[in-house]
Each structure stands twice: as structure tokens, then as C-alpha cells.
Image (cartoon, grey):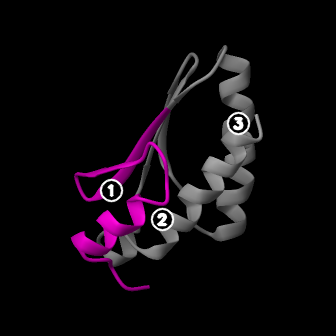
Amino acid sequence: MAKLSESEITERLKNVDGWEYHENAIHTTFEFNDFKDAFSVMTRIAFEAEAQQHHPDWSNVYNKLQISLSTHDAGGITEKDFTLAKTIDAIIEGE
């Protein structure tokens, strides 16, 4: 999959709320009621990421989940990152 240019990334960011581009990845942070809610969402994201064969870099501390997406094989951001970001947003919106 081809690496996107900065202008392509900027254009695609308009379609995903709360995601930012820096350090060669797109990033977002979510806050939940408690650890159980955060972990539940992480589990659902994990199943979707596995189905897409594209896995996030993420960290979780108590009720906060930080996610970074980048396609390491391509050396930057690809359409796979935006597809997974939209999937993650759909999971969060379903909460």
C-alpha cells in the first residue's frame, strides 16, 4: 500500500474527528468512565484490527486510551490507517 503525502493526510483527517497527524502517525486519545470501559473498547478494537490485519500502537492508563496509527511497512501513513481510524471511531460512537 502506498504511503500518503502530507496533503493527502490533511485531506483525509477532515473525515475523522479528533485525530491529529504528527511524528509520522495519526493519533487520538479517548477517555472512558473507568478501566473496565476502556479495556472493553480495546478488546473490540483488537478484534477489528486483527480482521483488518492492521494493528495500532496504543497505551492505556486507567480510563485513558491513546492510539497511534502508522503503516510501518510503508514507512508512514496509508489508507489502512484511515480505514482503521474510522472503524475505531465507529466502535467509540457505539458506546
Q: CA distance from mark 2 to mark 3?
A: 18 Å
Q: Are marks 1 and 2 in contact (CB under 8 Å)?
A: yes
Which residue is denoted by mark 2 in the rendering? Answer: 81
- Which of disc 3 and disc 1 is earlier in sequence? 1
Left or right side of 6 for 20: right
Mark 2 surroundings: few (<14), some (14-19) or many (≥20) residues within 10 A: many
Residue 58, position in %: x, y? 48, 41
Q: Quadrant of the C terminus?
A: top right
Which residue is denoted by mark 1 in the rendering? Answer: 25
Question: Amino acid type of disc 3?
Answer: Val
Kindly identify the residue that appears in the image at 47 percent across and 75 percent down: 79
Kindly identify the residue that appears in the image at 38 percent across and 75 percent down: 73
Q: Quadrant of residue 13?
A: bottom left
Secondary structure under badge 3? helix
Name above or below for residue 24 compared with residue 94.
below
**Residue 79 has which mark?**
none
Mark 3 surroundings: few (<14), some (14-19) or many (≥20) residues within 10 A: some
Residue 75, position in %: x, y? 29, 72
Task: Determine if the magenta segment contains residue 7.
Answer: yes
Mark 1 surroundings: few (<14), some (14-19) or many (≥20) residues within 10 A: many
Q: CA distance from mark 1 to mark 3?
A: 21 Å
**Residue 41 has which mark?**
3
Question: Amino acid type of disc 2?
Answer: Asp
Span colored in magenta: 1-29
Question: Amino acid type of disc 1?
Answer: Ala
- Which of disc 3 and disc 2 is earlier in sequence? 3
Secondary structure under badge 1? strand
Q: Quadrant of residue 12?
A: bottom left
Q: CA distance from mark 1 to mark 2?
A: 9 Å
Left or right side of 70 for 86: right
Name above or below for residue 36 compared with residue 21.
above
